[in-house]
Amino acid sequence: MLDRTAARNVLDKVKAEGRQALTAPEGKVLCDVYGIKVPKEGVAGNAEEAAKLASGMGFPVVMKIVSPDILHKTEAGGVIVGVKSAEDAQAAYEKIIASAKSYKADANITGVQVQQMLTGGQEVIIGAVTDGSFGKLVAFGLGGVLVEVLKDVTFRLAPVTEEEALSMLDGIQAAEMLKGVRGGDPVDRAALADMIVRVSQLVNDYPEISELDLNPVFATKDGAIAADVRIVVDYNQPAPRPRPSQEDIVTAMNRIMKPKAVAVIGASAEDGKIGNSVMKNLINGGYKGEIYPIHPKADEILGYKAYRSVKDVPGTIDTAIFAIPAKFVAGALTECGEKGIPGAVLIPSGFAEAGAPELQEEIVKIGQKYNVRLMGPNIYGFYYTPANLCATFCTAYDVKGSAALSSQSGGIGMAIIGFSRSAKMGVSAIVGLGNKSDIDEDDLLAFFEQDDNTSIIAQHCEDLKDGRAFAEAAKRVSKKKPVVVLKAGRTSAGAKAASSHTGALAGNDKIYEDVLKQSGVIRARSLRQLLEFARGIPVLPTPKGENVVIITGAGGSGVLLSDSCVDNGLNLMAMPSDLDAAFRKFIPPFGAAGNPVDITGGEPPQTYKNTVKLGLEDERIHALILGYWHTIVTPPMVFAKLMVEVKEEMAAKGIEKPMVASLAGDVEVEEAAEYLYQHGIPAYAYSTELPVEVLGAKYKWARGAGLL
Amino acid sequence: MLDRTAARNVLDKVKAEGRQALTAPEGKVLCDVYGIKVPKEGVAGNAEEAAKLASGMGFPVVMKIVSPDILHKTEAGGVIVGVKSAEDAQAAYEKIIASAKSYKADANITGVQVQQMLTGGQEVIIGAVTDGSFGKLVAFGLGGVLVEVLKDVTFRLAPVTEEEALSMLDGIQAAEMLKGVRGGDPVDRAALADMIVRVSQLVNDYPEISELDLNPVFATKDGAIAADVRIVVDYNQPAPRPRPSQEDIVTAMNRIMKPKAVAVIGASAEDGKIGNSVMKNLINGGYKGEIYPIHPKADEILGYKAYRSVKDVPGTIDTAIFAIPAKFVAGALTECGEKGIPGAVLIPSGFAEAGAPELQEEIVKIGQKYNVRLMGPNIYGFYYTPANLCATFCTAYDVKGSAALSSQSGGIGMAIIGFSRSAKMGVSAIVGLGNKSDIDEDDLLAFFEQDDNTSIIAQHCEDLKDGRAFAEAAKRVSKKKPVVVLKAGRTSAGAKAASSHTGALAGNDKIYEDVLKQSGVIRARSLRQLLEFARGIPVLPTPKGENVVIITGAGGSGVLLSDSCVDNGLNLMAMPSDLDAAFRKFIPPFGAAGNPVDITGGEPPQTYKNTVKLGLEDERIHALILGYWHTIVTPPMVFAKLMVEVKEEMAAKGIEKPMVASLAGDVEVEEAAEYLYQHGIPAYAYSTELPVEVLGAKYKWARGAGLL
């Protein structure tokens, strides 16, 4: 257990004095409490003391002004490095005081810090920042000007485990530098990781620490010492966002997504009205629960008894779908609250997105007061296919499957529906989140985690209202089901004013990149990739190992497929000689050895069959990438049907391995690709990249979930 | 004019002595001849001389062993830096000699070099390497361990102009370092560029210089001095590849690609035979020239009079298409030579790709002897649609257009045909290059450059037999027509043994990356991208400026389209306030200001029309990206037809700007995208990336061709 009294005292004093930063000695106190190694040092009140202190810790030393009024010490002439004798230390003291006074005549000067001077080893930076969405993050990078230019830094949510801290050492581009280059010693990785862990605990324990820099930290083969510490504080941290418990989230979301009864507030018999489209989608979609149209005057709508208010409905209601103008939402929502309805699907726009944040704040308060979870506002609604539920005014969708998708934007939602229909992608749910006044991505994660109808979750988002809650949910859920995220607005992050190096390095997207990875999320780089991953990942069985083999009829495809493997982090198996010989038996003598297995272009169906069967049967191979070349000898559909046959023959024997295919040929390959996909082999015409990207995503998930 | 005698003498001496590297003083001679600044220095034969030399140039100095037998001076204890006095210089001399002798007792020691010691400024590396395909390349990077780890280096074909040399300073990731960071001075860019130019001339003038390192070069605000020079020589440079003149290439290629008469060697009346498919493709494709089937016995094939040999054909033949087994090719090719046929299309496989390089060498010799240009062997043939010519055994293709495509691999060729047919892409030619025994990418570039039926050239290649010739042709051609290249095998480059830093940094793909860019080539990153670029670039008019504006109905698409603009190097125009006001007149009050112009989701067709028209009319805007959101109010085809209408209305007024579109919606958007594309607006359903990639490629070309 740490004795935190000293740290608390320092921070209380800084607060009392209205300061935004700690002095170096104050920073050192916090380091000492948390076991963060710093150089020997002391503060001298006069030149003699400086000489004595320096002699005690051994030369060379660094001497620095200590003054709460001087933030930029170097600029003030307040730093002298490489002081080599007691005599020099005395002179340095006088010079520093004089410089500081001429820099700022009225500066309150505490004294001069004398510090053991560190040299050698690798200079690194360890720091921490506070992000509006993710909260405390710890950062690691190499020290020096070049790294500042290249912005080679990595982030993790604080606090981190030792394992996560170690992953940071490998998470920078220049990771090799830590392993010792040009005959240099490798750094003490455990010591660096330990320091990162301690920093992450420090900032986690004291929310008022908004930024922290250990810069530089000297990392040698024997340890790590932070030569300088800089701590910035902000006592006005926002209060943590109130969140329901996971149990409450799941209970409410289950009622909302799988309702026994829904009310349509603003139901209409008139064609073209949103409330009419919603009613028709519910009815024609085949929803089997109760449907209660709510209308101020009508007695019946599309054959269903209508009510004036949800409060007039005799039975329980799980989900209220709103199809009324924004200005009427608050009133109707209050009635939902009084009725005890757990969820409101707020289709109407006209809230924060339309310059009316006060309307949105009002409904959020009502939702909190009555414990009604709000989906939206400003959404298309949602689909939950296992319940035949189309709670939306958009076109119906009914191809059942296990992919759950969500989008922050309505346009992207429409693209999801169009793509799904076009690709015959089976989905469990499509959800619009819109303004995310309440229900957001982590609520959906909690629901889909326990939803047996869902095996993959793919989300489009522009921001995360509560990145910390999302990351925690994603980390847990992604161990069970793949979570794919398309984060839009990667490049919109404006330059943020920051008063520390780490702060300046914290480009918004880099934080997303690292935290999503830390949370086991597969990040889609484009809309199509989000959609293709949602479609392909659930189709593929989980690989049991890293050995990928390419079997191709077209040598040219083989080369491009190999490129794609490298791009997507896949490991092309080094072909064992016995296996190589076994493949060679099936292919012409001029077919290429190794991996890719190049069966050459003119081969009959049997050659594809023999080699693919061998690839599936041999236990050393864990995944196959097929490169098909359209010829008269092996036409596209003959190839496709044969591959499915082999796959099913092997599956009957209990052998299931991920297989993807790239089809080069005339237009008939499109039909063959479609057939292969529908039979469990993600396949693409005219592309050597897409099949490998999908396989790569499956691998990324399997690794993150600890299955490989 | 440089006096090259001294340089020649040094290199002759090194050759005579059978050495592979120059000594430092020898290197300095070459630097002096070429005006490459090096520190003051001299060679001392004894300790007193060393002291005298050092005093003359000023302290500190560096001292180094000079011995043809000691390549690794530091390892031999042969380097002492920071020598600060005459006394120290004497001691250093003795120590260096002693270390060298103990390192290699029988080393022939010339003396000890005394050199002015350089410090301060930015350390950079300037170097040169010899590449098997590209020849001499000059390299530039930052000095230091970190850069070696990050491999942050850039290459250009030597010799370079001053402008190209300057582009290298911006061509590294850490370019900012040269501009002065943390208040440091910027380097003297002109001096660095000048040194790069001189190095490039040096290696260009002496082919035997295989590798060169100036490392480090100290770059300050006042100049640049190379602290160390290392020159590796190889007197066994391969002879330059014999190349026909551009004029001869064009003359021959015009006859081959646009023949008045073709012979089919191995023509056959039997279904399923390659010689039968070729005949049918010629006849059914609508080729209007003479067709001469060649067959050992037949008198007539498919209604055409057959001949025993090309030599029996009465008239002139331009192109001989080979459809006979490999072993008969040499004989028939000789007859083609004797007949004076300028081109042979060698469909047969069974040559180098099948382990028979000697068969290939034989036909290459015959081709050279008789001046018959060879296409292939091991190819599908070629298509040239303006002549209705399908000189191939593959399926016919007849959609005329201006894209000329080629592939090294047959599989990729089939993918080109399938994609083209599926996307209704108009092509002028599709060419298979296969083993590239003779005709290669640069021959095609020369032909398509002057072919009025072609406006874009897209090539798939795995290697460039003569990268230098390709680069020269591409640099010239890309000024007139876009050249797109998919270089496969990016990642297959094995580690090459190299005896210089620059050599070790020269990853094969980085050279391709830089040289293709230097040559104005647009590099496709994937097969689909190659195909989409070939399809989309010719459809788009050339932009007249860099200002891109996004007009979108879906805010979510706007964010993703903005991301894509950054990814593709497009400049989102900062919206002038008067133009902003003009857009605002057409959109709802809650529509978003600036760029993207967010017209919001529920708007009628007129809003799309008004805003797009304004975007086309305002001269400050140079390109538009449209984000469509499928709604009942503005259905997909209504949007598509309206956009085409606006486009044509503006075109009638002489206003033509590139426009691309991203369509988010249900499956009907696919038809709308198709319609837009066919009417000059590249459009994609369910994708915010593809339209922007295509526009980005058009911009990349326009910039490279100096049109922007």
Image (tube, coloured by chain):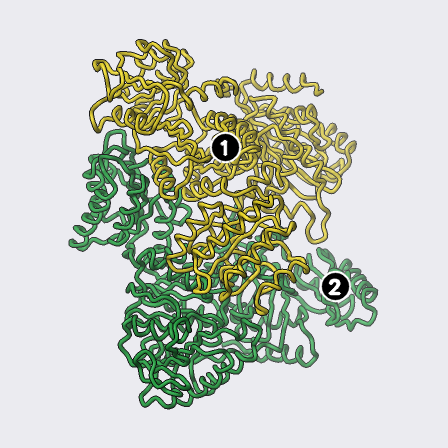
Chain colours: A yellow, B green
Q: Position of residue A147 (x, y in %)?
A: 57, 44
Q: Is A588 situated above or below B550?
A: below
- Residue A128 picture quarter: top right
Using a 10 Å C-alpha cutoff, classify the residue at mark 2 as few (fewer than 14 neighbours), some (14 to 19) or many (20 or more).
many
Q: Chain of mark 2?
A: B
Judge depth for marks 2 and 1 and give the one in front.
Answer: 1
Q: In what quadrant of the picture does the C terminus of chain B appear? A: bottom left
Give, as a three-letter code, the residue at label 2: Ala
Q: Is residue A126 visible?
A: yes
| Residue tagged 2 | B51
Nearer-the-camera pick, A124 or A50: A124
Cβ–Cβ below 8 Å for labels 2 and 1? no
- Residue B335 picture quarter: bottom left
Q: Position of residue B523 (x, y in %)?
A: 43, 58
Please indicate whether residue A366 sits to the left or right of residue B649 in the image.
right
Q: Of the numbered discs in the image, which one, if any, rests on residue A108?
A: none
Mark 1 residue element: loop
Q: Position of residue B81 (x, y in %)?
A: 71, 57
Q: Of the numbered discs in the image, which one, if any, rests on residue A498?
A: 1
Using a 10 Å C-alpha cutoff, classify the residue at mark 1 as few (fewer than 14 neighbours), some (14 to 19) or many (20 or more).
few
Nearer-the-camera pick, B187 or B578: B578
Q: Chain of mark 1?
A: A
Q: Is B72 situated above or below A642?
A: below
Please indicate whether residue A113 sits to the left or right of residue B540 in the image.
right
Give, as a three-letter code, the residue at label 1: Ala
- Residue B67 picture quarter: bottom right
Mark 2 residue element: helix
Q: Residue at x 52, y 62 (%)?
A: B511
Nearer-the-camera pick, A705 or A313: A313
Give the Cα separation between the discs numbered 2 and 1: 53 Å
Q: Position of residue A31 (x, y in %)?
A: 67, 27
Q: Residue at x 44, y 33 (%)?
A: A404
